[in-house]
Image: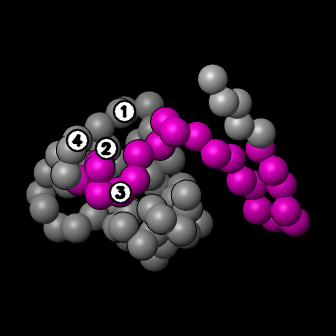
Amino acid sequence: MPISVPVVDKDTFYIGTAAVPPFESLVNDMKADKNQDGKISPEEFPDPAFRGAVLAIDREQGNNDGAVDAAEWNRAL
């Protein structure tokens, strides 16, 4: 089993994991975009434990509108 190692580059922290699905998988396979607006809000996110992460991604990589779209999700990952 592969083991990822976190890497830090100045103010960016990188970690590789197969546990984080691509945005398209969240929308298509997990039906996370319940209102079909092209974004996933914390309430729509399939795993309640990661709802805070959705807001953090939106705040750090997005437009701070309270949801993440594909571009924001992909920038974060």
Vertical relation: 69 (above or below) 29: below
Vertical relation: 41 (above or below) 43: below
Q: Look at the numbered disc 1 and give the secondary structure of its residue.
A: helix
Instruction: State the quadrant of the N terminus.
Output: top right
Q: Residue at x 42, y 72 (%)?
A: 71
Vertical relation: 58 (above or below) 51: below
**Cα–Cα span, label 2 and label 4:** 9 Å
Disc 3: which residue? 23
Relative image position of residue 43 (x, y in whole percent):
28, 45
Q: Residue at x 77, y 39 (%)?
A: 5
Disc 2: which residue? 45
Relative image position of residue 51 (x, y in whole percent):
41, 42
The circle drawn on residue 25 is none
Name the residue furthest left: 35
Looking at the rendered structure, the kind of residue marked 3 is Phe
Earlier-in-chain disc, 3 versus 1: 3
Q: Crowdedness of circle 2 by 10 Å Cα count: few (<14), some, many (20+)?
A: many
Q: Residue at x 29, y 48 (%)?
A: 26
Disc 1: which residue? 48
Locate residue 46: give its quadrant: top left
**Cα–Cα span, label 4 and label 1:** 13 Å
Coloring applied to the structure: one colour
Instruction: Tell me, yes or no, whether the two marked residues, 2 and 4, touch with CB atoms within 8 Å.
Output: no
**Cα–Cα span, label 1 and label 2:** 7 Å
Earlier-in-chain disc, 4 versus 3: 3
Earlier-in-chain disc, 4 versus 1: 4
Disc 4: which residue? 30
